[in-house]
Amino acid sequence: QYCSKCWLSLQTFRWSGGSIAAASRGLRSMDPGAPTTNASPTPAEFSAESTNPAATDRIGGQETTPPVGLLPGETVVREGKATILFPSANEVFYNPVQEFNRDLTCAVITEFARDLLAQRGVKVVVPGEKERVVVSLSEEANEAGIQTEEKDGVEESAVTATVGEKCEHGLRVLEGLAASGLRSVRFALEVPGLQSVTANDFSTKAAALIGRNAQYNGVSHILQASCRDASMLMYEMRGKKDRYDVIDLDPYGSPASFLDAAVQAVSEGGLLCITCTDMAVMAGNSGETCYSKYGSVSIKAKYCHEMALRIILHSVDQRAGVYQRYIQPLLSVSVDFYIRVFVRVFTGQATVKNSASKQALVYNCVGCGSFHLQRMGRRTSNGKHMKYSAATGPPTGPECEHCGQRHQLGGPIWAEPIHDLAFVQKVLSGVSGNPSRFGTSKRIEGVLSMVTEELEDAPLYYTVDSLSSTVHCNTPPLLQFRSALLHAGHRVSLSHACKNAIKTDAPPAAVWDIVRCWEQANPVKREKLSPTSPAFKILSTKPSCNEVDNNLLQHFKVQGVHKVSLQF
């Protein structure tokens, strides 16, 4: 259940007796019942470790020779600005794949802090931002811009927030499941404008290690170790004056058991950062388990990764609604083996009434993969007032009109936009303007660039290979298929969640019509198709492209132009 579960179970037999005794000296002061515990060794024990960690040599991300003062069996791993002590060199203790997750989180919290602290009269300063290049359309505009910047510099508040310094009016951050404290240490070292960072873990050994890492990196004035149950800690901080501005939940598996406490413990307009790694459940392998955890039935479909994002957003919004709160998604990404969402939480009884109309059921055809969304509620504007009513449906019949197969019912899922494009653009500008800040900057740029191009109002997607596989024909090139949809008058985009995905506002009938046009240029052997197969039923319908529309076929021969993306 906790991030530290794996390495804590192994460290009991990897540590020698002497190291256990040494560790116990740092644990005697730990009180599991205390709300916040600074689990650091004594100055005498830590004096040898107080040397500059950047002065030691390393190969890859690990030390060539252990620094003086490490406990037996410990190793040092560097990521970003942080240098973290681990009880073993085994890779299970440090997951380098998650570096992208941590880099992206630092970038998102930085822009969130910039926006929020500007309202408090605090200017956020990020090292390396002076490297940004501003291109003006004319020399006059450039001169005017310089004069404006100078004027703003005079009028701006003298209060600035830099990395590594405690900001009295800054953000209060909680990492609920911190394990070694790597993420929290990186926050303290790389994100400006922080008042405090609480790194919590239920394990006393993990909390002790967090304290050592905080002191080893010189951020004990910002970062405090806590040894508490994460849910109980958040429940106790529900008061309006006690809430955290940022709560980061990155559990080993599902975050479902922490969501109720998290939506209450985050401040008004605060940021929730949530990771889900139980993708087998959320991608349709166990729909009943997904419903018990998230209140939504997952289904096996090609769009399962985006559906997983919409399931967790639905779950967070549903639990927030209990307390008259609602969410605003800033960024939602599906990466590697997990999904990650960043949402702001607000309070408003009137806005919470919109929640039902933001959720939708999914009708998915088991034969051809066509899908339809059915909103859970309906709202219509009546002057200055909003009228709410039950939704009408279903959006399709009991059998698929294209292949004659039955439908699966999934959801409910979040049917509104899953990104705030204006905010995403700010994060993208910050990363691209300061590429040396993160080790995964190029990949972040690739993912966020694709996110900014996604259609906001087109939930879920098709994949070109699954469409062609359904009718047993050759797969059309992705960009040419996209070109055909655009020529037919529909909007279309790619998706960051799948490299061969097509998001479009075209109805399923229009999508299959283009597939039929492609099949005419690349015919299949009809005699080999079963009369009961989806392919036979789909191809039995004559394509609607007539003589005028036959140039659709020519678009399959035109190579589209697409910016190379680095997200995959």
Image (spheres, rainbow, N blue to C red):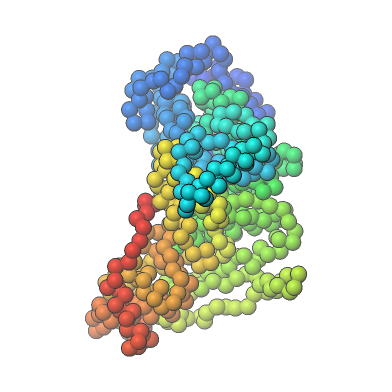
Q: In this rendered view, identify the residue nearer to me: 336 or 344.
A: 344
Q: Is residue 145 left or right of residue 481?
A: right
The quadrant in which residue 441 appears is: top left
Image position of 509 with respect to 261: above or below = below
The quadrant in which residue 536 appears is: bottom left
Instruction: Count every numbered label the image shows and give the total.
Output: 0
Q: In this rendered view, identify the residue nearer to me: 408 or 480.
A: 480
Residue at image point 47% right, 16% down: 51
Please indicate, yes or no, whether residue 481 appears anywhere in the rendered image.
Answer: yes
Residue at image point 52% right, 45% down: 143
Query: x and y percent of residue 119 in the render?
Result: 68, 44
Q: In this rendered view, identify the residue nearer to me: 560 or 234.
A: 560
Please indicate, yes or no, whether residue 261 appears anywhere in the rendered image.
Answer: no
Q: Spot the residue most to the top.
A: 44
Q: Is residue 482 left or right of residue 307?
A: left
Residue at image point 27% right, 73% down: 557
Q: Is residue 67 left or right of residue 427?
A: left
Image position of 472 with respect to 98: above or below = below
Q: In this rendered view, identify the residue nearer to me: 57 or 182.
A: 57
Residue at image point 70% right, 72% down: 381
Query: x and y percent of residue 362 in the render?
Result: 53, 69
Query: x and y percent of residue 258 in the render?
Result: 61, 46
Query: x and y percent of residue 449 in the render?
Result: 44, 54
